[in-house]
Amino acid sequence: MNAIVHCKVVNDFVGQGYGSLDLDVSKEAVSLVPDSDKLVDTLGPKVCVGAGTGLGQCFLTRSNRDPSLGYECFPSEGGHVEYAPRSDVEIELFQYLKKKFSQNHRVSVERVVSGKGLANVYEFLAQKFPDRVDKKIHDEFLTAGDMQGKVVNVNAKEGSLCEQAVHISAAAYGSECGSAALKFIPTGGLYVTGGLTPKLLKYIQPSDSPFMKAYHDKGRVTPLLDSVPIFAVLSEDLGLRGARVCATAEMNLWLAKQGLSSSAAEKSVEKVKEKSAWTNPLMAFLHVAAAVGVVALIGTQRKK
């Protein structure tokens, strides 16, 4: 354990943010506006918004004075901002969720945009439209535990209650991403991440999808979004990859302070990527940890 000379603990979604720096958007993401890859400003801020078990958000900035320092990622609790209903049905949903979660004035957007949020929306629709409930699906939903959102998505057939729930959740997702775009103007890229994104892709990617319609529904400032490159990320291992990006950066910083070359670290990381191909996240993490430990140990021995 004496070889461990530095440790950094990061927020889980900060890992997602750093993981976005490791993406090949041409292969691992889809552009949600035309030519997003050509719009990217390499000095511009980046934002990640990702729905999964919850709704995570983070942002990254780069120094204009010294771009060689790269991006630094900052955590956020943006998933807990207020949910803003956009239709009469959604206003009723808002009232339902306030009562369900014992809130007098507000509901977090995460209550609608997440796996559990999707379940909340379906639950509301089922009590509002009992005649449209499919008993078999509803019984499966009631016994699905943490997988209720999956039951809704899998059964989102045309005209069904499940489809309506997905539409509402996807629209709220797009609206929140649009709000994040307005707040940060992420000319370096807005990355829609999280486990829910690839699963809801058909409700996100098309230009007339519930997601994109809500994303662009920003009134008189809508044209501002034309300058924001936006990508739906298909890979679900960004957190792990972000941990590697963080580890490599911290290792290079430590090596630089010791007056040592970072080439050994870079070679170790490349070998990890080649061997694991990220097919086994646990093994990839262990390989990275071992590589970091070995390089740190070499540095310690040289210093002696």
Image: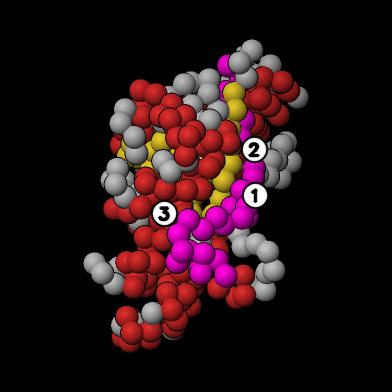
Residue 167 vertical placement versus 1 (above, below): below
What residue sits right under mark 1 in the picture? 77
Which residue occupies 61% across, 15% down?
A: 64
Density class for disc 1 (Cα within 10 Å; few <14, some 14-19, many ≥20) is few
Q: Is residue 182 left or right of residue 130?
A: right
Disc number at residue 74? 2
Which residue occupies 57% across, 70% down?
A: 95
In which image quadrant can residue 276 be found? top left
Q: Secondary structure at mark 2?
A: strand
Kindly report which numbered mark, 3 or 1, lies closer to the viewer in this rendering.
3
Amino acid type, mark 2: Phe
- Quadrant of the image containing the C terminus: top right
What residue sits right under mark 3 in the picture? 171
Q: Does label 2 or label 3 sit earlier along the sequence?
A: 2
**In whole angstroms, how far apart are the C-alphas of marks 2 and 3?**
26 Å
Visible in this render: residue 249? Answer: no
Q: Is 81 covered by the magenta stretch?
A: yes
Along the viewing direction, whichever of 56 and 206 lies nearer the viewer: 206
